[in-house]
Structure formats: structure tokens, C-alpha cells
Amino acid sequence: MSNCTVIAVVNQKGGVGKTTSTYNLGWELGKLGKKVLLVDLDSQANLTMQAGVPTPDKLSFTLATLLTKCIYDDEFTYDNEDILIHKEMIDLLPSNIELSNVEIQIVNVMSRESVLDRILEKYKDDYDYIIIDCMPSLGMMPINALVAANKVIIPVVPEFWAVKGIEALLKTIKNVKKKMNSGLEIEGILLTKYTPNLRITKEMEQIITDVFGERINVFDSKIPAVTKMGDTAINSLSAREMYESLKIKKHKESIEKVMTAYKNLSLEIVNKEMK
């Protein structure tokens, strides 16, 4: 039996830092010596672009290719080197716009919720962690991610309406756990775009802790809001790579805060599994 941990990074709300958190958590787990596969489960392909593929729609083989073959039970012999994107600390199963067509096709497929799980089974023996970056919805693709996963990380921006969104997501996770994946557990709520000097941030953090803290872990690590982080996506870099490349002290210090937060998050996850 594989010891691979599959983590779905899920929130139906956009702009909460799912892709940034997936990429940087994967990178920091890699720095800890873990073998990590990232899965881009979003037709916008932001994670694929983050990993250095500027035009994902030109890729010949992607996750959509594998899903389509699986849906139609087609025999498909392939070399992982044709599909996987290799970076220093992570590998990536890329996506592109074709994934949107797969989402339409998958609706009428038998056992449609477990198509992704069948694909990821082929990778589990090669990795310690598989982290799935989900599209901002609670549709069929995120459901596939929840069925395939052991753990769920919920990135949340501490702002108004965040609590209502979490409640809707928790209901979906509960249904998946009850009906399709009894081993699914919530690893924690991850506060992102965190600005501790803003009153609204502290107020919403307290509300999230009060409402969910007794039943769901809220990570000690909080990802700070740093404007310079926008350059990491543009330059296809992790926070750690950006930190190592910067020369201007004030920029370096701001990125270091983000890098340290993701490092601490990776340690929280690994140390919890060792208990």
C-alpha cells in the first residue's frame, strides 16, 4: 500500500491563493527531501504557467489527455517524460483549456467522481505527496479531487463572506466523505493574504477561529500579503527562488516572510503526519 499523501487545495472562491499555496507548499516539501507531484486541475492552467509553461494550450499531452483516455477506457501507452514538467523541487502534471471539455464529457460517465483517482493511482508509488490545485468551483473536477485525496487544505482570505463560503465547502466535503471517500480529512484552514495590522483581518481571523477552530485545524502558519509576490508568478518562481534572486533588501525581506510562512506550513504538515 502506498504511503503517498494526496492533498486537495480547495475553495470555491477565486483569488484566495490556491495556486500560489500549491506551488510554494510543494516547493517547501521538496526542500524537506520529499518527492512531490503537483496536479493542475484548472483549465485556466495558472499552476502550469507558474511552473514555467507560458503557453499551456500548445502542450500535446496534459492531464486532460489522461482524463479523456480514462473516461473512454482507451488503451494509452505513454512516457511520463512526455507529460510531466520537471522543476528543481517538484514535478507537475500540467493542464490547459482542454480540461474544460473534459469536465463537460465527464458528467455522463459511470463512476465519474473517481476518474482522477484512477489516474493518480499510477503516480502514488513514485511520490510522497501529490498536491492538487483545484479550480474555483464545487463542480465535478473539485469533487474528483476530493475523492482522490486523503487531506484537504482550505485557503481562506480573512475578509467578509469568508465564513459563509467555508460552510458551503464543508458541506460538500462532508458529503464526499460520507458517500465516496471515508478516508478524507481536513488538514486545515490556511489564512492567506494575511495583513495583521488591519482590523478586519484580526476580526475575521477571530471569527474563523471561533466558528471552526474546535472542529477544524487552523494552521499556525499564515501567508502574509506581499505585493512583490506577484512577480513570482510572472517569472515562474517559487517564493524561495525569488528570495534567492533578489538584491534589494526591502524586497528580499518581504519575500522572506512569505517563504518562511510556507516553510513553516510544510513543517506543520510533515510533523503532524509523524505523530
Image (spheres, grey):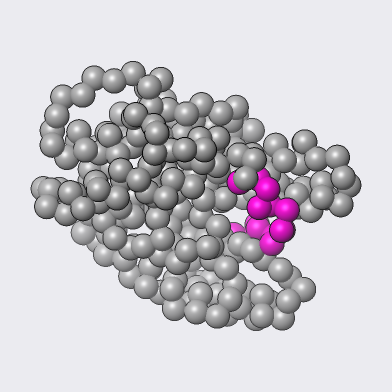
**In which quadrant of the rendered image does the C terminus lie?**
top right
Residue 33 percent coordinates (x, y) = 60, 29
Residue 130: tell me if it is visible: no
- The magenta span reads 219-233
Residue 204 percent coordinates (x, y) = 61, 78
Q: Residue at x 59, y 64 (%)?
A: 191
**In which quadrant of the rendered image does the N terminus lie?**
top left
Q: Out of 5 and 46, give the one closest to the viewer.
A: 46
Q: How many marks?
A: 0
Q: Residue at x 68, y 52 (%)?
A: 229
136 left or right of 248? Answer: left
Q: Residue at x 26, y 64 (%)?
A: 175
Quarter of the image for residue 50 reads top right
Q: Residue at x 34, y 29 (%)?
A: 60
Vertical placement of 158 versus 18: above or below?
Answer: below
Residue 116 lies within the magenta run: no
Quarter of the image for residue 139 reads bottom left
86 left or right of 198? Answer: left
Q: Out of 26 and 83, give the one closest to the viewer.
A: 83
Q: Out of 68 and 30, give the one closest to the viewer.
A: 68
Residue 223 lies within the magenta run: yes
Residue 170 percent coordinates (x, y) = 38, 68
Residue 193 percent coordinates (x, y) = 64, 63
Residue 16: tell me if it is visible: yes
